[in-house]
Image (tube, helix red, strand yellow):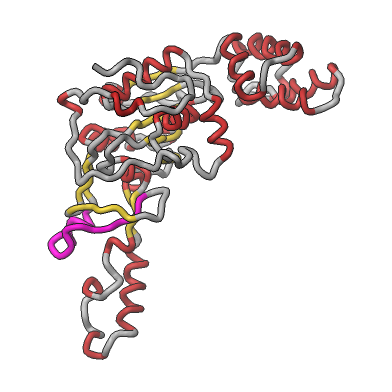
């Protein structure tokens, strides 16, 4: 029997993902053929030192550890809500690093985002231009051949999977997907996500239509230049991805969407947790850093503050040679209430 928890929150990478028990019968998926697991040696936040640092220093609370494991065991998305600066997006990178899930696939949501954007992007114009170029250099007897019959104009050459579409490929082990700031989407996107996240599969109509002639298409996946096979235009996962959806609490979600998620509500950290965060990022807090922590906590009830504001103030206090009075003035300017007039703030 596998041990609970798989994710420990210790930030020490391990192979615990292999200890997950079989999924509940209603969350079992049978996609294939299986794709190799992501390279464990590859940094889950490759190319971004900032994300690497946040993954290595993330301080998970006991509640966070419990609910991350619940999402992993149940094969359900994790909806993480809370004020800005509480580490919602960093959680995805921390879990991916500890469980060696490979590079995090990230989908940044805007008011214009649609489900199609997350699944795949198809460029019909580039296909048309490629067909015209191919016809222009072909033999005279081929000049009237249909564009789809011209070499180099296959649909798969002009299609790329998005982050959600890549996460749902039949990987042998789960991929990590961050759907960031889902509350910024239009009203339809959460509902549009329901079926895809529930069924763990989707279709690419452009490839379905071409499946008679090309049963298996080789398409580009998100975050890489490698191609992956898609059979008859249908993608179905084998291991349901670890999906983190973040929200700043700016809107309510439909009950049908909420019941399909495990919900984690992050709150402003207390003094002990803040000290642990400072220690992980900047080393043990000195006397002045402890004063800033206490000031930060005393002001939390008056409005939204982000933990990185505190970290910025402590870093500059250590890096500068300013006197205490000047440091207090600088800290005041670095830690205004978010969304309010800084002139209204005062220590």
The residue shown at (79%, 18%) is 328
The tally of labels here is 0
- Magenta includes 99? no
At a point 30% along the width and 81% down the height, the residue shown is 135
Determine if residue 72 is in view: yes
| Horizontal and vertical percent position of residue 89 | 48, 30
In terms of image quadrants, where is residue 67? top left
Position of residue 264 measured from the top left corner of the image (x, y, whole percent) = 40, 19
Q: Is residue 105 left or right of residue 268?
A: left
Please provide percent x and percent y for residue 272: 59, 9
Magenta residues span 205-221
Residue 110 visible in image: no
What residue sits 33% from the left and 62% below the top? Answer: 158
Q: Quadrant of the N terminus?
A: top left
Tell which of 187 and 290 is nearer to you: 290
Residue at 78%, 24% in the rendered image: 330
Task: Name the foreground residue: 308 vs 93.
Answer: 93
Task: Tell me, yes or no, whether the highlighted magenta stretch contains residue 213.
Answer: yes
Q: Is residue 25 left or right of residue 48?
A: left
Instruction: Quarter of the image for the C terminus: give it.
Output: top right
Picture quadrant of residue 187: top left
Instruction: Determine whether 168 is above or below 225 in the image.
Output: above
Residue 152 at what x, y percent from top left? Answer: 30, 71
Among all residues in the image, which is located at the extreme left?
212
Residue 16 placement: quadrant? top left
């Amino acid at each position: 029997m596998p041990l609970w928890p798989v994710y420990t929150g210790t930030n020490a990478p391990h192979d615990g993902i292999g200890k997950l028990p079989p999924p509940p019968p209603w969350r079992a998926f049978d996609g294939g053929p299986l794709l190799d697991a992501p390279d464990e040696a590859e940094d889950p936040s490759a190319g971004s030192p900032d994300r690497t640092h946040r993954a290595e220093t993330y301080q998970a609370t006991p509640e966070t550890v419990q609910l991350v494991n619940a999402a992993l065991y149940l094969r359900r998305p994790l909806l993480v809500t809370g004020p800005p600066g509480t580490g919602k997006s960093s959680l995805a990178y921390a879990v991916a690093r500890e469980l060696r899930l490979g590079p995090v696939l990230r989908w940044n949501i805007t008011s214009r985002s649609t489900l199609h954007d997350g699944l795949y992007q198809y460029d019909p114009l580039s296909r048309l231009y490629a067909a015209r170029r191919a016809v222009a250099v072909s033999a005279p007897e081929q000049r009237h051949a249909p564009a789809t019959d011209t070499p180099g104009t296959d649909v798969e050459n002009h299609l790329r999977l998005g982050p959600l579409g890549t996460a749902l490929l039949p990987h042998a082990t789960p991929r990590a997907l961050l759907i960031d700031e889902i509350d910024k989407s239009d009203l339809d996107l959460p509902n549009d996500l329901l079926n895809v996240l529930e069924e763990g599969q989707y279709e690419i109509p452009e490839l379905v239509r071409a499946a008679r002639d090309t049963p298996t298409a080789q398409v580009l996946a998100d975050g890489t230049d490698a191609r992956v096979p898609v059979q008859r235009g249908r993608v179905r996962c084998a291991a349901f991805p670890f999906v983190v959806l973040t929200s700043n609490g700016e809107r309510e979600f439909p009950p049908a969407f909420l019941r399909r998620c495990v919900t984690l509500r992050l709150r402003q950290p207390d003094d002990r947790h803040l000290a642990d965060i400072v220690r992980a990022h900047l080393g043990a807090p000195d006397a002045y850093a402890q004063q800033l922590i206490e000031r930060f906590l005393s002001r939390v009830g008056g409005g939204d503050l982000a933990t990185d504001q505190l970290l910025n103030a402590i870093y500059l206090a250590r890096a500068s040679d300013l006197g205490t009075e000047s440091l207090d003035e600088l800290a005041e300017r670095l830690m205004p209430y978010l969304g309010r007039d800084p002139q209204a703030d005062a220590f």
